Image (cartoon, rainbow, N blue to C red):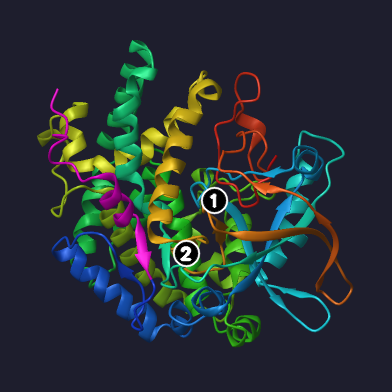
């Protein structure tokens, strides 16, 4: 079979650079990946469009989280857990392999006169999402505990704004699989390849249309788009992530509601809109955050958006989202500038499909591996090694606090492998004044070792297989041990 020539594949440092976005430019986010012709031009056009024309676009450049990362010597972050007993017993806080790769998932806190004010993302997780997750948990008696981490940053900390974009990790997923595929048996490898190739083969119609729109997004009205997207999203779970990010981005940037304006004055994007989108758009997801199951009904998209926020111009939203989802699909999932060929013209073997759909195959493999019966036995060979690579990249740049670079909504992580980080941890209590108040200091060590897949608060345990293994879903709050 024909696989990518190792001599021609980028080194890991370059691949991780390609998976990050820089927000240091005063004109907005900058793609750190290599220029790719028409799609690179569209990336620039989208940056200008979102930053300069969206009502809340200025928050892509200036926001409270960025202010702290640029200049603060001490930061306060909230981490929510349902495993305080394990944390205190072992004295360690460990990261999860979720959207922030191998960092400890947190949200910002701001010191106030009488306590710590929560970023609206932190408030939602602590008061809404985590309690719902605990209520659904298969571990009775669990309680939600807010942990406050005070971090002192050394002088040499990188003060640029570089965030990880998990939608750009497809090429890394693919490379890591190819390096370790013989951990699987012969039948498992054959089944995995056949599964992902068939998923792509049966999705070419949508992928071709999305690539065509991405290169020439105007006009963005295409009658077949919604139908093809609805059909394809069941075969390509990564489209659920793309749709959620595009819809959330639109709501946060284009909302004109009173709440959104008030949060903007505080330097925050309105995360409550994206949460409502997820739980209203995919009923039954409350309490676990599984974007692979995100299946919004695109036939009633305008109705859904209006229901979430009546200030949204639903006509504008439809055209915008067609173009935006198309761009993200082409730029993040395809390995070629040109639209893919029709299905009957393509040679559908794994080695050939890698050339045109490499990042997409990587995302598909990443999720298919979690369905394997033996996944609990070998997941760490993939997820832990990926975390090693991320920590190595962040440490090389002196990044102690990576953030979600898809959009700066307030998701921020702690790099547990950063060597010079000084920190103190407390349990906290939520007061009637809406502020967090420190309760008890606890001794703990931030440990660069991933927590088991069964411990994340937002993990969906319905699809666990064998012992404590899980299919593994994105964890908003990582219940660490």
- Is the residue marked by circle 2 packed among few (<14), some (14-19), or many (20+) residues within 10 Å? many
Residue at x-position 63% and y-position 64%: 107
Q: Which residue is mark 1?
A: 103
Q: Secondary structure at mark 1?
A: loop
In the rendered image, residue 380, in percent from the top left (x then y), is placed at 50, 30
The C terminus: image quadrant:
top right
- Residue 144 numbered mark, or none: none
Which residue is at the front of the view, 230 or 242? Answer: 242
The residue located at (47%, 64%) in the rendering is 247
Give the SS element for disc 2.
Answer: helix
Q: Is residue 247 above or below residue 359?
A: below
Tell whether label 2 touches label 1 (CB within 8 Å). no
34 versus 76 height, above or below: above
**Looking at the image, is 464 positioned above or below residue 186?**
below
Q: Position of residue 212 (x, y in %)?
A: 19, 58
Q: Can you give x and y, in whole percent of width and height, for residue 7 in the image?
A: 13, 37
Side of 14 relative to 51 (left or right): left
The answer to whether one can see residue 24 in this image is: yes
Q: Does the magenta portion include 15?
A: yes
**Magenta segment range?**
1-22
Q: Quadrant of residue 203?
A: top left
Residue on which the image places disc 2: 247
C-alpha separation, residue under disc 1 versus residue under disc 2:
25 Å
Magenta span contains residue 104: no
């Amino acid at each position: 079979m024909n696989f990518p020539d190792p001599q021609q594949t980028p080194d890991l440092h370059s691949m991780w650079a390609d998976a990050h976005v820089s927000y240091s430019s005063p004109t907005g986010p900058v793609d750190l990946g290599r220029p790719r012709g028409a799609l690179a031009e569209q990336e620039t056009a989208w940056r200008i469009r979102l930053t300069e024309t969206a009502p809340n676009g200025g928050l892509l450049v200036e926001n409270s989280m960025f202010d702290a990362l640029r200049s603060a010597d001490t930061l306060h972050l909230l981490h929510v857990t349902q495993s305080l007993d394990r944390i205190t017993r072992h004295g360690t806080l460990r990261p999860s392999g979720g959207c922030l790769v191998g960092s400890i998932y947190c949200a910002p806190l701001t010191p106030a006169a009488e306590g710590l004010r929560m970023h609206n993302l932190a408030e939602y997780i602590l008061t809404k999402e985590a309690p719902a997750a605990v209520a659904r948990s298969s571990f009775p008696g669990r309680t939600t505990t807010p942990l406050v981490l005070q971090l002192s940053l050394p002088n040499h900390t990188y003060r640029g704004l570089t965030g990880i974009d998990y939608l750009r990790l497809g090429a890394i997923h693919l490379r890591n699989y190819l390096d370790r595929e013989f951990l699987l048996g012969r039948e498992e490898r054959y089944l995995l390849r056949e599964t992902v190739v068939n998923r792509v083969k049966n999705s070419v119609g949508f992928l071709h249309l999305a690539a065509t729109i991405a290169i020439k997004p105007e006009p963005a009205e295409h009658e077949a788009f919604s139908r093809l997207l609805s059909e394809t999203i069941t075969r390509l779970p990564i489209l659920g992530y793309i749709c959620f990010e595009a819809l959330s981005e639109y709501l946060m940037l284009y909302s004109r509601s009173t709440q959104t304006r008030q949060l903007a004055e505080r330097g925050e994007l309105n995360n409550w809109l994206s949460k409502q989108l997820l739980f209203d758009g995919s009923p039954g997801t409350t309490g676990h955050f599984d974007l692979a199951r995100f299946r919004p009904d695109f036939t009633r998209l305008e109705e859904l958006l209006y229901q979430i926020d009546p200030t949204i111009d639903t006509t504008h939203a439809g055209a915008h989202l067609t173009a935006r989802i198309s761009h993200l699909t082409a730029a993040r999932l395809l390995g070629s500038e040109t639209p893919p060929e029709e299905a009957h013209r393509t040679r559908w073997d794994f080695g050939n499909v890698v050339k045109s759909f490499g990042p997409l195959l990587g995302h598909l493999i990443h999720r298919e591996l979690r369905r394997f019966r033996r996944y609990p036995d070998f997941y760490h060979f993939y997820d832990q090694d990926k975390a090693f690579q991320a920590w190595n990249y962040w440490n090389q740049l002196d990044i102690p606090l990576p953030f979600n670079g898809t959009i700066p909504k307030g998701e921020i992580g702690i790099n547990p492998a950063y060597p010079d980080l000084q920190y103190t941890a407390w349990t906290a209590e939520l007061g009637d004044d809406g502020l967090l108040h420190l309760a008890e200091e606890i001794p703990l060590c931030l440990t660069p070792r991933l927590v088991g897949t069964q411990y994340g608060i937002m993990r969906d345990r319905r699809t666990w297989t064998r012992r404590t293994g899980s299919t593994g879903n994105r964890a908003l709050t990582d219940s660490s041990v």
